Amino acid sequence: MFSKSCEYAIKIMAFIAFKQAKSKELVGLDLISEAIDSPRAFTAKILQQLTKARLLKSTRGRTGGFFLDKSQNINLADIVKAIDGPKLFEDCLLGFDKCQDDNPCVLHYQLKKERNTLKNKLLSTDIYTIAKRVNRQKAYFKE
Amino acid sequence: MFSKSCEYAIKIMAFIAFKQAKSKELVGLDLISEAIDSPRAFTAKILQQLTKARLLKSTRGRTGGFFLDKSQNINLADIVKAIDGPKLFEDCLLGFDKCQDDNPCVLHYQLKKERNTLKNKLLSTDIYTIAKRVNRQKAYFKE
DNA sequence: CTAAATAAAGATATTAATATCCTTTTATCT
DNA sequence: AGATAAAAGGATATTAATATCTTTATTTAG
């Protein structure tokens, strides 16, 4: 469903939200990749992508790290779009360039409702909600 | 959502069902790859996979080709499982080896219902239903 | 001012998915 | 029997995703 990069990105964003709910300190790469059990160098690349996409902010230097702009309410769809692009939401499931109601592929109408439900769920689930669940130990970043 | 191979596989299966509703003749590779607009050699490989998975039957030789066992009612989930494996239905969305109700990843409960709905839709949509829609020109194999 | 710690950037390596090409096997037609 | 046409199988090529390594830029602590 999601690329590996996107899986890491979701954990990254939720972890930073979780951390920042407890303390205002910036969150660094080492802490992140340890907490979500992801390869360090690859995680750094994803952090760069998220920063470029403006879902995260960062500062360099000795006390540098990553942090969230609290005025921004980020949902799962934002993250998926930033990393995997819009294909999960917009692209034809069977690869048509233009799969539309008047020229539908054989899955277009079959899965239209289900795709929409999924999309809406991702749009309506924000990272702070997820962070709260982790805080209550109802969900985990790693096994 | 689906791999490219799986996209082709769904079209292949639906096309053969569509063809066989009209005539009992076997359906050959050339006809298939032309009809669904897929690369010929790659399509041959997917036909092999489908045949090995027993979703299709084939005969070699001069009048050879592919055909469906009419006593078998094949749904989309069968095809997805045969080509992409069970990951869409069973695997953790965030890569846990064992993502369970008592050790859930941060998406486990969030998307449980939506994944189930999708799974059930794929289980309940069979290739003959799709073939009929194509026959009524309500859906197409290529643009 | 210098050393240390951090993110950013660029280069490279590895692996998996997609795709093609060539040969072999099988069945049919003449 | 021999030529032909089809699927099956094996080898290779190409591309994209995943991952690592090295260098550079930035900031701060001492």
Image (cartoon, coloured by chain):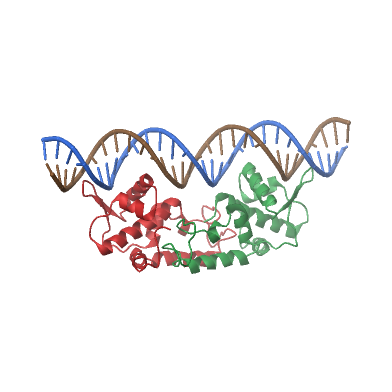
Chain colours: A red, B green, C blue, D brown
- Measured as percent of width and height from the top left, residue A1 is found at 49, 57
Left or right of A34? Residue B110 is right
Most foreground residue, B19 or D7: D7
- Measured as percent of width and height from the top left, residue B44 is found at 66, 45
Left or right of B20? Residue B94 is left
Most foreground residue, A128 or A24: A24
* Any part of residue A51 in sight: no
Task: Give the quarter of the image for residue A24.
Answer: bottom left
- Measured as percent of width and height from the top left, residue C30 is found at 87, 38
Residue A58, compared with residue A132, is above or below; it is: above
Q: Residue at x 39, y 59 (%)?
A: A141
* Any part of residue B78 in sight: yes
Task: Give the quarter of the image for residue A108.
Answer: bottom right
Q: Residue at x 38, y 57 (%)?
A: A11
Q: Residue at x 60, y 57 (%)?
A: B81
Task: Give the quarter of the image for residue C13.
Answer: top left
> Quadrant where the C terminus of chain A lies?
bottom left
Residue C26, compared with residue A71, is above or below; it is: above
